[in-house]
Amino acid sequence: MAKAKTAFVCNECGADYAKWQGQCQACGAWNSLSEIKLTSGKTSARVSASQDPRYQGYAGSITGIQDLSEVDLGDVPRFSSGASEFDRVLGGGLVPGGVVLIGGHPGAGKSTLLLQTMCWLAQQQSALYITGEESLQQVAMRAQRLGLPTKNLKMLSETNVESILTIAQQVKPKVIVIDSIQVMHLDGVESAPGSVSQVRESAAVLTRFAKQTQTAVLLVGHVTKDGSLAGPKVLEHMVDCSVLLEGSEDSRFRTLRGMKNRFGAINELGVFAMLENGLREVKNPSSIFLNRSNHPAAGSLVMVVWEGTRPLLVELQALVDDSALGNPRRVTVGFDHNRLAMLLAVLHKHGGLLTADQDVYLNVVGGVKVLETSADLAAIAAVVSSFRDQILPHDLVVLGEVGLSGEIRPVPSGQERISEAAKHGFTKAVVPRANCPKKPIEGMKVIGVDRLSEALDAIFDR
């Protein structure tokens, strides 16, 4: 018997090596290499979607050499998932032949979202739902509890990829859901389901099938305890779109964020509410994140962040208190910890406020994670407000990036952010001077600033 060929693949970046080594030379990670057994040519031939030579390419049909100017630029034929928030994150809807990877913590609502989507799509076209972790009875009970239309949705409980593709070639669905990729396995890979080799090879075969048959495939992926997708990093490189469904245990709201998208913008955000009858879209996310207390308190301020292609108003809260420790604490929720430390140093240097002996806590209300620098000025203003115990106006909105030399830098789409704040009833905005609108906004007083000291004077009316 011929010896099986093996390779060693980095779980972090997907680089492969002929033999094991302690550190990956591509990304520098230690102890991240896992051994995988390479599939044989017989297995690849057995799961091939078609024997037509035109369909032997990984990304679909193989064509001859063409000039870039000769490539057909026809519109990609998208179709809706039935939820506008889901479509927004996907870049406008599902794409035939596109592979979408959906991750999230247990109980976040991945299966619920996909079951709702597939039940709606089944009324329009052929759809196939593959469940590998639940029985068909469990899925049917959930659909009944959510009051979903179950007619026309084809169900299959299977974990063998070869069997799934054989049935898919007979049924010819337009959309397939694989729940989940971690329990799928190939006969030609001699390792347990969920291992690096099984996840990698199963995803590769399913992706090849999607491209060759123009079938939209949605894969459910598990996440690790730190929130990243489990399995080899190459899994995220294979798919066309990777989204993450997030939500805290004490909140009924869920956020769907696009991490990668070959057909649209990344970092797009969709908001859902988990109700008794399933996940429901939130058309105006700013309204839920601006559910502020009727009793104003120091340290509370509203900022405007840009999520994908739309502005989002969220509340930022800060608490500054005397520290009883030799090393004061810096705690953030939804905000970068290192950036807070940098902003406190800028505040001391250019704002004249020392917080070296104070504990500083910063929280973005509603479970939103701020990934951009437009919240810098709002974070500093909230810290100063809490430190001085001075309540800020309820109709004030602040945005702007703060540089190390104390300058206030402009942010992208500044005028759109200001207009969004005006729609929600805010009457005063402190923004970078370069972001001031060319035409006055009715009911909104916009103050442009260039330096941190100037911004603090405008915010606190000094």
Image: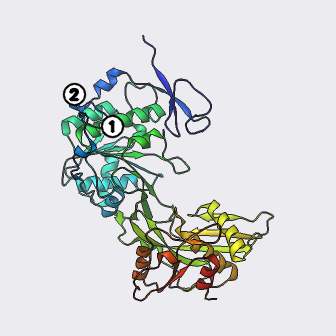
| Residue in view at x 43 percent, y 43 percent | 236
Is residue 290 visible in the rendered image? The answer is: no
Q: Is residue 390 above or below residue 250?
A: below
Q: Nearer the viewer, residue 186 or 208?
A: 208
Which residue, given by chain and number where applicable, does mark 1 sit on?
206
Which residue, given by chain and number where applicable, does mark 2 sit on?
53
- Percent coordinates x, y for residue 277 in the rendering: 34, 63
Residue type, label 1: Leu
The answer to whether the residue labelled 2 contacts the one labelled 1, judged by CB atoms less than 8 Å apart, is no
- Percent coordinates x, y for residue 84 in the rendering: 30, 63
- Percent coordinates x, y for residue 127 in the rendering: 23, 47
In this rendering, the label closer to the viewer, 2 or 1: 2
- Percent coordinates x, y for residue 284 in the rendering: 38, 72
Left or right position of 112 against 251: left
**Mark 1: few/some/many CA within 10 Å (<14, 14-19, 20+):** many
Quadrant including the N terminus: top left
Quadrant including the C terminus: bottom right
